[in-house]
Each structure stands twice: as structure tokens, then as C-alpha cells.
Amino acid sequence: SEKDKAQALENTLYQLIKEYELLLNTISATGFSEEERKLIIANSYTSGSGQQIFLDKNVIIESDINPNESKQNIKDDNVKKYLRDFALFYSKSENPTVSFNKIEVVGKFSEELIQVNFESVFSGFHILKEKKYQASQRMVLVKLVPDLVNKWKPLIVAVGYNAKAYIYSENKNKEQVEDTIQSLEIIKYINKKKALELIIAANEEQALHVGISYSHFFSTNVFFSFQLKYGSGNNYRDYVYNSLYNSLSINYLFPVKFIKNLYLGLGTGGVIALDDINGRLSEGERAGYYPGSSNGLQFILRPELRLSDRFSININANQMYFFNAGDMIGRERFHLGIGGVYFL
């Protein structure tokens, strides 16, 4: 049953965390030579070793070896360096001094990626530091990798504190995510690269817009968006863009985040006028298609509320400065709207 499968997966992930705990206790145990420790460390990230628990040597671990280091100055090491530093600076003992407790599977965010949280307790000491270790809340991201024997095999792809995580992406680049409180918040952007959004917005000229957009996320900070919107309302400016009773607008946006929730982007597109402007007709304001009428620079403030892995709600405050739009050159327009997002 599905319940049995979920329980089996949870047991497997629990065992993986315990194997990580065993690895740290092994390389900090007395009775091993330096060469033996190096071999144990290499086997932990080497495919086919029989002792592999990390995806590969590129896995990033937020170091917790130095008890004096604050979470604001965390070192980020690859798994090889982290384990070798741990073996070098952490005290040796005949008995285990590393304990991982309160192991909790936080969620399965895709068919492949899972987050597991745990409490880490070091009862040993740093050989060069006097300060004692404090218990810390840690997280791992686990990837289910295809396996010929068991269909899939869980391997660790990132280890860190809950307040920040380094993500191991499919193209083996490491992407730092700094503007999240919980690592849970960033998982959507790793696997959910595409999204559909329903938009309802209005501008200062009393025009209401309803539309849909398709977005592709290149990273947490950069995305491309294609928008199709229907606009209707009473407008008072004399240019065709949003000066129509009924219109369709087609826009392409390239926003880049430069401050939390604040994007700067280039926009381009056109307007299909469905009606003439009653009482103020000119040759440029009749029904028809007007390409390039929404070329401009946009500042987009986009706070977002996550409802689930696939759904979110955002508020869009958009200030646009036009590049080329007849008498709109150098002028601006403010839009305020709400959007419902579904991640594909």
C-alpha cells in the first residue's frame, strides 16, 4: 500500500542519517591510521564503494566543526574537505561522541528530492578551541537515485543549518539561497522550474486587467514570463496603450531579483485594440494591433505567500517606464495586482 511505501521510505531515510552519524564517529575514533581515514572518507562519496552516502564529491556541507563560528560566518565546504577537517580537528575517542537525534522527514518535494531535519550533538571537543559544542538543528537534502538492485538509492546532496542551505542542482552547479528563513521555502524553485499564474490587476487610470502568464525560472533570482491580458476600463490618456475600453496585451518580461522581493526587468510587447476610443478618435487610436507599445523598464515588487509545494499567492506592484510608445516616451504607469501561481 501507499502507507507501507511511505513508511519504508521514512525508515530508509532514518537509516541514511544514522549512517552519516556512524561515518563521523568512525573517522573520529581511535585506532585508525590517517590513510584508513582517508579511504573511509573517499568511500562515502564514491559510487560503487559499498559505503556511499553522498551523491559525489561536489556535495556542499555548511561546516559546524568550529564551535566559535557563528551562523552568520558559516564556512561552506565540499564533502571531502569537511570530513577531512572533522577528522583532523575533532577529538578522538574510543566511544561514539556524535549523536543525531530527533530525525524527521520534513517532506517529499518531488519524486527525487526529500528534506530531512535532525538535531546534531557533539559531546567531543575541538582540539584547538576551548568552547564546548552546543546542540544544533541541521538539515539534509536527499536525492533518490536510480539503482539496479532496489530501484532507487537515497544519497545526500546537501547538509546545512535550517536557516540557510546550499542546493545541489541537476547541472552540478551549487546555488546559494540566502533570503529564506527555512530551507523548505527554496525547494519549489529547484524542481518547479515552470509556473502558470492567473493575474488580476489595475492601473492608476482605472483600467482593470485579467490575464494569465507562463513563467520559466532559470534560478531563484531570474525568470522569463509571457503574459496575455485582457483590459477594460475608462482611461484618460491619449495613447493607445491602456487608453482603450477593451484590449488584449501580449507582454514578455525578463525580471532579475536584486533585493528581496524586488525585481528589475525589461518588458516588451504589444496591444490589440478591440474598440476605438469613443469621442477621441485619431488614426493611432482605432481598433487594431500596436506592436512595441509596451517596451520599457519595470520595477516589480513581488511578495509571495507559499500555500503548498505547488501553489502560491503574490502581490504585484509594478512601476513601468516606457522606452518607445509615441507620446508615452519617458512617462510611467503604475500597476497593482494579485496573482495565483501554480507550479508545473
Image (cartoon, rainbow, N blue to C red):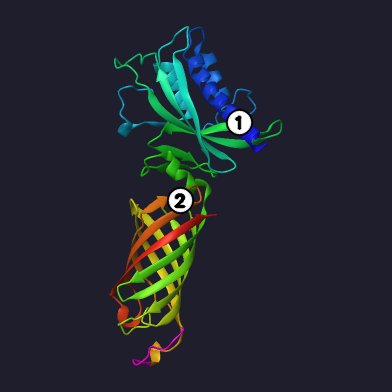
Seen from the viewer's position, the closer of residues 319 and 54 is: 319
Given the image, on which type of amino acid does mark 2 rest?
Ser
Indicate which label's residue lies in the foreground, 2 or 1. Answer: 1
Q: Residues within 10 Å of mark 2 (few under 14, many from 20)?
A: few
Residue at horizontal 60 percent and vertical 36 percent from the top: 144
Q: Is residue 209 above or below residue 87?
A: below
Q: Secondary structure at mark 1?
A: helix
Provide the residue designation for mark 2: 219
Quadrant location, the N terminus:
top right
Q: CA distance from mark 2 to mark 1?
A: 33 Å
Answer above or below: position of 186 versus 252: above
User: For the point 47% across and 6% down, which residue is it?
Assistant: 94
- Residue 236: x, y in percent? 30, 82
Residue 203 quadrant: bottom left
Residue bearing the label numbered 1: 7
- The question of residue 50 being in magenta is answered with no
- For the record, the magenta segment spans 274-282
Residue at disc 2, secondary structure: loop
Can residue 57 be seen by looking at this rendering? yes
Q: Nearer the viewer, residue 297 or 316?
A: 316
Residue shown at the point (38%, 68%) measured from the top left: 201
Asked whether, in this view, residue 50 is left or right of residue 69, the answer is right
Query: Is residue 281 rendered magenta in the image?
Result: yes
Dot placed on the residue nearer the N-terminal end, 2 or 1: 1
